[in-house]
Every structure is written in structure tokens, then in C-alpha cells.
Amino acid sequence: MKPTRTILLTVVLVIAVLHVGCEPEKKIYVAPPVALPPATIEPPAKPPLPVIEQLPLPAAWTAENALRLAPGAPWLRDDLPAQSLLDALDLSLGKFAAMDPDALLRFGANAVTVARLVAGMNDFRAKLAELGLSDAFFRYLQENFVFYSSAAPQVTFTGYYEPLLRGSLRQSPQYPYPLYGRPDDLVAVDLPQFYFFREQGNLPQIRGRVDGSRLVPYHTREEIDFQSRLAGRNLEIAWIDSLVDIFFLHIQGSGVVQLEDGRRVFVGYADQNGHPFRSLGNYLLEKRLIGRGQLSLQGMKAFLKEHPEIIPKALSANPSYIFFKISEQSATGTFGTRLTPWRSVASDPRLFPLGALAWIECEKPVLDAQKRIRGWEKFGRFVLNQDTGGAIRGADRADLFTGHGELSELVAGGMKQPGAIYFLLKKEPPLQ
């Protein structure tokens, strides 16, 4: 047996022993701490930036070349009320305030401190409150801010929303499908802790479960949904009337469950089973079950409703499975803030600064009297980069959060439009 394999097996055995040997946490009484004189109390250290999953960068992209300084400011405009922008700004600023001001963010080839970014965003906010979304405000930005554009020739914008599901806290014939919380046997292994990490590749973390003395892959979607591998373990946080709706909730990452008694429960991402995401749309296209004209959320839902016999194989084609938890608020992004409908976007955090202010130019739908999309028109808008997504990878992708409700689902389900994204950074004052 090779030395590397021997050490790897030893690590897995240690993980297994630690996992199976842990006893449930016992509640004990802890005496209150003795108050210290004020002079001896040190301020708590500010947390660093959120830890983002460091997957390999796409070919031909690096954090340095993902953003480039735009040759000139774009023609600025904004199609939404200023208050929604102020709200989204405050959420990002509140999160940045708790972070290390010396932590660095990447703006193309430049490394920028959190302190500098926050100072610029505060200046932006003050001028917005003073001038509103006016020509004077736009001129101020063009004169006092630099704009970094995506180095991709074109950015494709999709939409995502917060689904509203019908459910119950009890299983019944009307609500037969479980919405699962995180299983306690799901194990995450941080490979960079082990010396063989560099020899084995650059995948930072794997997930699995302990089976005897072995760490094995966790259950797939097919095993969970159609072989009931998690049944009887008291992991259900709600029961839902549609397995297809649960599937699309997994793609969105958070949602709202409307209970029988009228109450609403917010559910958010808790963990993932470690298997890769596979596109349902690509599967249906490859099997020639739908045409490209049906390749929207609404089109795929309609097809599965009309062909329930396809559901097991179609859903199982995506082995990735999301586990949920009860949340106190509506959709929360990876940056840790509540998402603002139409003002929050998701992008690749390896390439674009998370939490930062940006301006997008894209296309929004034009609806007819029956709320059908009959065309698309250009718009410009300020947004906050407050989220990420498993399918949002590369400098040419971004995802616009549309909130929840019928219109939000309609727009998110049909949106796949060309556009551009620019990140704003306040110019540094000239040296005296």
C-alpha cells in the first residue's frame, strides 16, 4: 500500500472514531463571569470576510483579470425607487461594519481594504439621500467613482426567487413529501488540513457519511427522495404537497412554506450532500423530452405536471440535495444579509467582491394583459452583490433576486438575458 493511501486511510479512521464516539451534548450550569474593570476589557476582534467555498477558477480566469477598469463611466440610470437601494445599501454596510477593516477585497488587479470600500459606499449613500436618483447624482458618481467592468465580453443574467410552497407540519395524503433538515451523520472533511492536500488536487472540502470504518459519499437525490434513505429519523421540518416544488426550492436555496393554518414559515439553506449540481433543463433537452422553447421554469414545471411518470428519473438526474433550516427572516444571501428584491444579485465570489455596490445593465420582461412575457426591454439599475449560487460560476454570469410571488417567479423563470455589470469604487484623493 502506498504511504499516501495509508495516511489517508488513517485520517478517515480517526474521523470515523471521533464521529461515532461523540456523546450528546449535556446541559450544565455555568456560573456568570466576574465583571472586569473597564480598562482591562479588550474590544472583540472583528470577524474577517465570510469564508467562501474555494472551488477551482474557470479556465482562462483569475481573480486579477475577472474585473478590469472600465475606460469610462457607463450611461447611468435607475428604474426603481431610491428607498429600495438605500435599504440594500444599509444591509451591506451593516455587515461590513462587523468585519476587519483591513481585510482585502479584489477589484481586478487591485487589492482594496474593507475600510476603503465602506468609505466609498457611505459617500454614495450620503449623496443618494441628498440628491435622489437624479442627473446630478449620476454626474457626481461619474466624476468621483471609478467603474470596474466584468472582463467577460458579455454577462448573462438569470433570475432567482423565493418560492412559496404549500405545506403542513404533519404528514398526510395531501402533504406527503418531506422537506428535510440537516442529517446529523453528514460529515464535512476540510482537506487543506492534511499534508496530502496539494498532492491530491485542490478540492478544499468533501462531504460524506461514516459507514463502519469508512467515509463514503452521502446519499444522492435518488436515494433520499425515491428510496427513503432518511425516513424515520425525525429530520422533517415540514411536509409539502409537491415533490417538484421541493426540487425547485433546492435550486433557489430558500423559500416560504404556507401552512394549513395560514402561518408562513421561512426556510433557508442549511447544508448540501456533497454531490455535484446537474441541470434538469439539460437532462430534458438531451433526452429530447422538451424543446428549447420550453426551457424555462414554467415550461419545465408544466412538462413534469403533464408527465408524472418522468419525475423520478428527471429529478434524480441531479444528484445534489439541499437540506434546510427554519429561518427568522426571508431569503438570506451568502454575504449574511437579507436579500432585497430586484436589488440583490448573486455572482462568483472567487471573481467579484462580495457585498460590494454595482451597476447593471440588462433586459427586463414586457408583460401582456395575461401576464405573459411578450418581449424584453433594456434597463439600468444599482444593485448589491450579496449572494452566490452553485450554478453561477465565471465572469460571464450573474443572478438577479426577484423576491417572491407570482411576478417574481414569472420573471426569474424566463430570464436569461445579455447584460453588463460594473462595480463602483470611490476614487482616492490626490496626494498633497
Image (tube, rainbow, N blue to C red):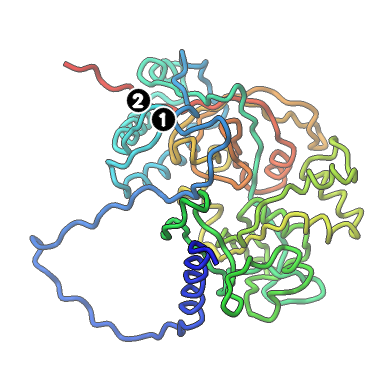
Q: Is residue 260 visible?
A: no
Q: Is residue 431 above or below residue 222?
A: above
Residue 401's x, y, as percent? 60, 42
Of residues 201 and 346, the one nearer the viewer is 201
Disc marking residue 179: none
Estimate how packed mark 2 is, as few (under 14), some (14 to 19) or many (20 or more) residues with alpha carbons within 10 Å. many
Taking the image as shown, residue 153 lies to the left or right of residue 224, namely: left
Q: Secondary structure at mark 1?
A: strand
Question: On the picture, is 389 further left or further right than 243?
Answer: left
**Image quadrant of residue 229?**
bottom right
Q: Quadrant of residue 37?
A: bottom left
Around disc 1, counting alpha carbons within 10 Å, would you say few (fewer than 14), some (14 to 19), or many (20 or more)? many
Q: Quadrant of the C terminus?
A: top left
In the rendering, at what x and y percent does residue 106 appear?
40, 34
Indicate left or right for 293 with 115 as reference: right
Residue 372 visible, this orientation: yes
Count the marks. 2
The answer to whether residue 245 is above or below residue 423 is below
**Which label is found at residue 107?**
1
- Residue extending farthest to the front is 1
Q: Which mark is residue 426?
A: 2
Numbered disc 2: secondary structure:
strand
Q: Residue at x 57, y 27 (%)?
A: 79
Q: Nearer the viewer, residue 416 or 19?
A: 19
**What's the residue at 52%, 63% (across, down)?**
2
What x and y, as percent, mark residue 142?
41, 16
Q: What is the three-letter code of the residue carrying label 1?
A: Phe
Residue at the spot 88% in from the left edge and 42% down from the top edge: 290
